[in-house]
Amino acid sequence: MATYDDVARLALALPETTEGTSRGWRVWKVAGRQFVWERPFTQADLRRFGDEAVPPGPILAAAVEDLGEKEAVLAARPGSHFTIAHLDGYAAVLVRLDVVDGGTLAETVEDAWLARAPRRLAAEHGP
């Protein structure tokens, strides 16, 4: 099972990444733009979706390039990546850390970084 510390290790290995908090949750940013963040289900989520909609284990939110990319990621990774109505129209996916494998998590974090990094920095980092 992956942890937020695994996410931190992966995120902080990318250029110009910082770690902070927002609403008490850990967030990782590049050039001031959040690209991955803790996204536990809140009491409002529980009221909105009910207990059966809440997957067990820690949840990470990850930015994606655009809504087309979001649909592609969700189709390619149905076991570990998902979304909720609250994220409709927003370029981000949710990741179940209790089931995602290490390689997929690393790819997700790097792709999220690339989605939010300034073009110059992304180009310097390479494909």
Image (cartoon, helix red, strand yellow):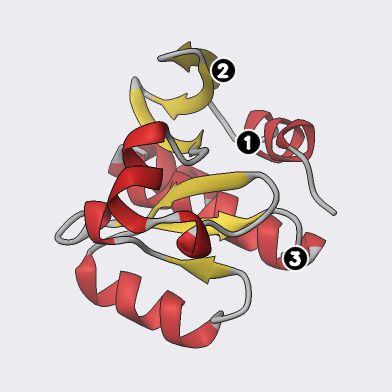
Above or below, comparing residue 29 to residue 70 in the picture:
above
Q: Secondary structure at mark 3?
A: loop
For label 2, the residue is: 19
Answer with left or right where residue 61 lies relative to residue 103: left
Q: Earlier in the sequence, mark 3 or mark 2?
A: 2
Q: Residue at x 46, y 63 (%)?
A: 53
Cβ–Cβ under 8 Å for marks 1 and 2? yes
For label 3, the residue is: 99
Q: Amino acid at mark 3?
A: Val
Answer with left or right where residue 96 lies relative to residue 21: right
Cβ–Cβ under 8 Å for marks 3 and 1? no
For the residues labelled 3 and 1, the Cα–Cα distance comes to 19 Å
| Front tag of 3 and 1 | 3
For the residues labelled 1 and 2, the Cα–Cα distance comes to 9 Å
Q: Residue at x 40, y 45 (%)?
A: 46
User: Where does the image place residue 61, in percent across and percent down from the top left?
Assistant: 47, 47
Q: Amino acid at mark 2?
A: Glu
For label 1, the residue is: 11
Q: Amino acid at mark 1?
A: Ala
Give neighbour class at mark 3: few <14, some 14-19, many 20+ (Cα, 10 Å).
some
Q: Secondary structure at mark 2?
A: strand
